Image (tube, helix red, strand yellow):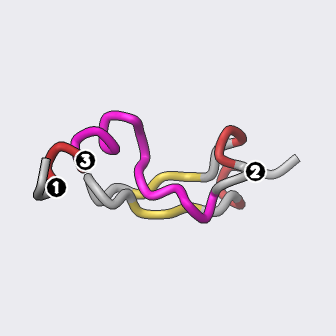
């Protein structure tokens, strides 16, 4: 088992805060951009053309 500090992390495209790898993102970690569903929705609603 890995320690929390050893997990890969990214920076959220919406809020700019760092977030760590989660088991539910195992298959598509490369495609994950947002730390939460709330940030994903906020980024989609703020995009032009909506």
Q: Secondary structure at mark 2?
A: loop
Residues in magenta? 29-42
Query: In front here: 19 or 3?
Result: 19
14 or 2: nearer the viewer:
14
For label 2, the crowd category at 10 Å Cα-Cα, with few meaning under 14, some 14 to 19 and many 20 or more, is few
Residue at the (25%, 47%) spot, across then down: 44
Secondary element at image label 1: loop
Query: Residue 34, position in %: x, y?
Result: 41, 51
* Disc 3: CA contacts within 10 A as few (<14), some (14-19) or many (>=20): few
Q: Residue at x 37, y 57 (%)?
A: 12
Q: Counting residues from the N terminus, which is met first, the one under dot 2 or under dot 3?
A: 2
Q: Are marks 2 and 1 in contact (CB under 8 Å)?
A: no
Query: Where is residue 7, by image quadrant?
Result: bottom right
Q: Residues within 10 Å of mark 1 (few under 14, many from 20)?
A: few
Q: Residue at x 34, y 55 (%)?
A: 17
Q: CA distance from mark 2 to mark 1?
A: 36 Å
Mark 1, residue position? 47
Q: Is residue 42 left or right of residue 20?
A: left
Q: Nearer the viewer, residue 30 or 23?
A: 30
| The disc label shown at residue 44, or none | 3
Residue under label 2, please give it: 3
């Amino acid at each position: 088992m890995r320690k929390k500090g050893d997990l890969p992390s990214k920076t959220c495209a919406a809020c700019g805060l760092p977030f760590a790898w989660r088991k539910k993102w195992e298959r598509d970690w490369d495609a994950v951009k947002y730390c939460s569903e709330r940030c994903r929705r906020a980024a989609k609603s703020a995009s032009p053309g909506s």
